[in-house]
Image (cartoon, rainbow, N blue to C red):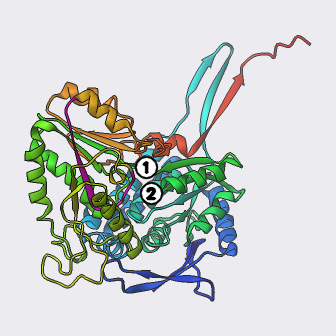
């Protein structure tokens, strides 16, 4: 398999250009070669996207919406094929790829497809005149994806951009090149003009060139805080629009009156779903002292029953980490936790066999880890690990836990578990985070904005809020009388 560029409606041919091997995280066997986009590819993609933009911007919202809605239908019809590609590329269980990744991508296309015809400005009745506003598209937008949810992120960025009349060049992570190409093919089959959604393969060097390109109007990144800062600085030179969905070290607060079983379920979803490789994960689990021991007992018991193994097996609940290098990084954090005095209650080791006794020693598998006896100052409680590592901390009072939860440069997400609805809202309103849950965690319906505070990002994805990030507002004043002039 060769993963090349998708430009102007077609895949480019493989040539002598630079490439690297794409590996299956579950066994580290090669799946194909990924071709690095050249400067010529970048120019061709920008030219193609500009040409498509000039066609697409003249379409009515209803016409654009029909293409997006048809793309959603095609995506759902290819659910199993694309989900399998996603599982092989990322290492996550096929059950997740089927239930979340491809389905949520289709939801985004469908949602913004339905919204496209309703994008509108405002009317102002003035004295002997009137005014109105027009939300107009920006032009050629760039989406830069992360490796944990490749097709979902591509759709989350493309759907609002295209609904508003823009075109998009999408650069997937160099570790997950496959499903963005399949999404590009879906758009073409749905009737999009060639060049409306181009795909360029590459690492950060390709992303940097796109950020610096004078014909690019907007950048939307899902990635690390360090990468976000570089893109923000690069875009500032030309005052480009930027949306940044970055990392976090989010708190999940569990009060003594919470439903214990539901709280344990949420803590596991907030730490072990997609092998813990989720930016919004609630990796600092604060549990009120009165229920700490009973919570920990249930959490340990259920965590040790997680079925870790072959990601393509429908019975698997946890798959493999994205790469050997990333797995080693997560292991270093686990070692740091142990050396700093935290107690590794369970997990945190590389298994030889999976839950069905199959040999998985060649893959990037790591058993889910729970740390107790944690301190807020420990590295495992401060830094984003992006792996299946849960740090559990106790607290006494509401005021105390709010202060500790907010003591971080990040602010992507937060969760609160309580049966006191007044306390639930009261606490959530004081937490410095952009995406929050009460009595659940990591549920991200397309109807709600997604994004963070502080160093966790700029702007919002999904919902009506995304429209303002892919349009620019034009004000028009219309005179109905004579022009009064002192001259």
User: Circle 2 sits in a helix, a strand or a loop, which is it?
Assistant: helix
Q: Which residue is drawn at 37% across and 59% down?
A: 105
Q: In this view, does 344 lie above or below 402?
A: below
Residue closest to the far right = 487
Residue 215 is at least partly visible in this image: yes
- Residue in the foreground of this view, choosing between 140 and 487: 140
User: Residue 311's quadrant in the figure?
Assistant: bottom left
Q: In which quarter of the image is the C terminus?
A: top right
Q: Where is residue 277 in the image (x, y as percent from the top left)?
A: 34, 61
Q: What stretch is highlighted in magenta?
A: 383-397
Residue at numbered disc 1: 112
User: Circle 1 sits in a helix, a strand or a loop, which is it?
Assistant: helix
Say which mark, if any, is on residue 68: 2
**Mark 2 or 1, nearer chain start:** 2
Residue 386 on the magenta span: yes
From the viewer's perspective, is 294 left or right of 155?
left
10 Å neighbourhood of mark 2: few (<14), some, or many (≥20)? many
Q: Where is residue 278 in the image (x, y as percent from the top left)?
A: 34, 57
10 Å neighbourhood of mark 1: few (<14), some, or many (≥20)? many
From the viewer's perspective, is 60 left or right of 317?
right
Q: Position of residue 164 (x, y in %)?
A: 54, 48
Q: Which residue is drawn at 71% across and 49% down?
A: 237
Residue 387 is at least partly visible in this image: no
Q: In the rendered structure, are the residues bearing label 2 and label 1 in contact, judged by CB atoms less than 8 Å apart?
A: yes
Distance between the alpha carbons at the discs numbered 2 and 1: 7 Å
Residue 167 on the magenta span: no
Q: Position of residue 263 (x, y in %)?
A: 16, 45
- Residue in the foreground of this view, choosing between 315 and 343: 343
Q: Residue at x 26, y 64 (%)?
A: 96
């Amino acid at each position: 398999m060769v993963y090349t560029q998708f430009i102007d409606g077609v895949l480019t041919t493989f040539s002598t250009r630079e490439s690297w091997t794409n590996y299956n995280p579950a066994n580290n066997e090669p799946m194909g070669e990924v071709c690095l986009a050249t400067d010529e590819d970048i120019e061709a993609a920008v030219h193609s996207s500009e040409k498509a933009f000039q066609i697409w911007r003249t379409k009515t919202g209803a016409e654009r919406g029909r293409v997006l809605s048809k793309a959603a239908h095609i995506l759902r019809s290819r659910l199993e094929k694309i989900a399998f590609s996603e599982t092989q590329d990322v290492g996550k269980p096929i059950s997740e790829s089927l239930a979340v990744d491809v389905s949520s991508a289709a939801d985004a296309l469908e949602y913004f497809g339905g919204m496209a015809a309703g994008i509108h400005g405002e009317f102002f009745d003035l004295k002997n005149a009137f005014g109105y506003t027009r939300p107009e598209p920006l032009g050629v937008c760039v989406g830069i994806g992360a490796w944990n949810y490749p097709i979902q992120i591509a759709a989350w960025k493309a759907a609002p951009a295209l609904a508003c009349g823009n075109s998009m060049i999408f650069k997937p992570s160099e570790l997950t090149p496959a499903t963005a190409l399949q999404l590009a093919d879906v758009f073409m089959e749905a009737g999009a003009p060639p060049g409306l959604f181009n795909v360029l393969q590459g690492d950060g060097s390709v992303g940097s060139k796109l950020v610096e390109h004078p014909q690019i109007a907007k950048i939307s990144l899902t990635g690390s805080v360090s990468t976000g800062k570089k893109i923000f600085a690069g875009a500032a030179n030309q005052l480009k629009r930027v949306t940044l969905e970055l990392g976090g070290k989010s708190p999940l607060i569990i009060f003594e009156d919470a439903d214990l079983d539901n709280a344990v379920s949420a803590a596991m979803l907030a730490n072990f779903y997609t092998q813990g490789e989720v930016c919004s994960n609630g990796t600092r689990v604060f549990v009120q002292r009165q229920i700490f021991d009973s919570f920990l007992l249930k959490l340990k018991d259920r965590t040790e029953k997680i079925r870790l193994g072959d990601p393509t097996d429908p019975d698997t609940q946890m798959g493999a980490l994205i790469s050997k290098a990333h797995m080693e990084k997560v292991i270093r954090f686990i070692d740091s936790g142990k050396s700093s005095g935290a107690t590794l209650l369970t997990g945190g080791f590389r298994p030889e066999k999976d839950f069905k006794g199959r040999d998985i020693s060649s893959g990037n598998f790591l058993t889910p880890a729970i740390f107790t006896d944690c301190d807020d100052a420990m590295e495992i409680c401060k830094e984003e690990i992006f792996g299946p590592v849960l740090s559990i901390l106790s607290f006494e009072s509401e005021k105390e836990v709010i202060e500790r939860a907010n003591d971080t440069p990040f602010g992507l997400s937060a969760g609160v578990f309580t049966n006191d609805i007044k306390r639930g809202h009261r606490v959530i309103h004081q937490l410095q985070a952009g995406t929050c849950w009460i009595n659940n965690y990591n549920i991200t319906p397309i109807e709600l904005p997604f994004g963070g505070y502080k160093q966790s990002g700029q702007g919002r994805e999904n919902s009506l809020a995304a429209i303002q990030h892919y349009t620019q507002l034009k004000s028009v004043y219309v005179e109905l009388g004579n022009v009064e002039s002192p001259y």
